[in-house]
Image (tube, grey):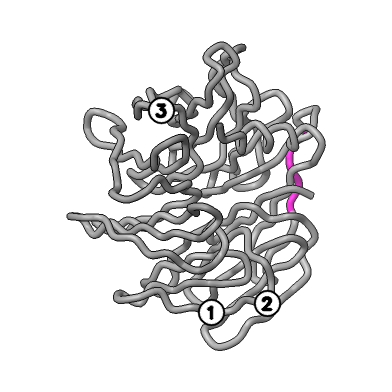
Amino acid sequence: MNVGGPVRAAEASTVRGAAAHRDARGFQRTLLPDPGTGFLLQAVCDPYAVGATGSGPLVLAWNGTFWERESLPAPNPALSGAMLTGVSARTAVGGAFDRLAAAETPLLLHRTAEGWTEEKAPGTGFPYVLTGVHGDWAVGHGFPGTVVLRRGLSGWTPVAPPGPATRLLSVTSLDQYVWAGGERNGEGVLLLFDGRSWSERRTRTGPVTTLAFWRGHPWAAAGRTLLQWTGRRWARHRVPLSVNALASSPTALYAAGAGELGVYDGRRWDVRPLPGTWLGADPRWLVGSA
């Protein structure tokens, strides 16, 4: 049984969330609402940031001036350690442990004009949680299979990439192309869907934890290694920090970790201190814990 979701949610009860906004001066810390307990932010896609408090999932929304806490559907009392770990546009994903079923279960939320509602997560034949989402694709992990979901007109359906089970942690997409990153037996794995079939690359690194697009190419991070897809292969770049989150602007690639931020202009890295442990990023925001 994977316990990533519940362990992270337990951590959320003892830490304080953090957010930093990018302006002309760089990334600057911003105030967050106080939910009355410890909390952790895991992912951001403007205007939403997601994570958990010690008692359940958390969604914050940026109104242009400050962050506000969003109302969520009433939690299922059977769930323990519920946390949201990914957000894209109006979709948020995560997981929890169902104490009655003694198994992990996915969380899948959608933002409508009336607020956040639960979406039905499809069955895969085994328990699983979701870890990342981008556009119409979501990924996660369970046992004994690889978890990839695709959204269509009738809702979400599971997709089964070939090969051994892979623990997927992140996903990004562009047009018909989809890239998913994670690990198998501790080694990084990258999956590519070209609109017709899947292919796999083993990275000879630790787990691939985050993906981002910059200058028309996907980039993947695995600790202090960055991998850039050239259209034919993954080119390797060394990074002067251990990367948790990637984001980009037209002029720079941003790599955030524990207490520091690396800015890459295509030629060199400029590493700057930024207090906090940064776990999620988009072009305007970093989120994590203080």
- Which of the numbered marks, if any, corresponds to residue 240? 2
Residue drawn at (51%, 42%), measured in percent from left and top? Answer: 131
Q: Amino acid at mark 3?
A: Phe
Residue linked to disc 1: 237
Dot 2: what SS? strand
Q: Quadrant of the N terminus?
A: top right
Q: Is residue 75 visible?
A: no
Residue drawn at (28%, 49%), measured in percent from left and top? Answer: 162
Dot 1: what SS? strand
Q: Residue 120 in the image: x percent, y percent?
A: 38, 23
Magenta stretch contains residue 33: yes
Structural crowding at the residue carrying mark 1, measured as other residues with C-alpha within 10 Å and reported as few (<14), some (14–19) or many (≥20): few
Q: Which residues are magenta?
A: 30-34
Q: Residue 246 in the image: x percent, y percent?
A: 56, 63
Q: Nearer the viewer, residue 26 or 118?
A: 118
Residue linked to disc 3: 126
Structural crowding at the residue carrying mark 2, measured as other residues with C-alpha within 10 Å and reported as few (<14), some (14–19) or many (≥20): some
Q: Residue 23 in the image: x percent, y percent?
A: 64, 65
Comparing marks 2 and 3, which lies closer to the viewer?
Answer: 3
Quadrant of the image occupied by residue 153? top left
Comparing marks 1 and 3, which lies closer to the viewer?
Answer: 3
Q: CA distance from mark 1 to mark 3?
A: 37 Å
Q: Is residue 194 visible?
A: yes
Q: Amino acid at mark 1?
A: His
Residue drawn at (52%, 49%), measured in percent from left and top? Answer: 46
Q: Residue 209 in the image: x percent, y percent?
A: 54, 56
Please identify the dominant SS of the magenta region: loop
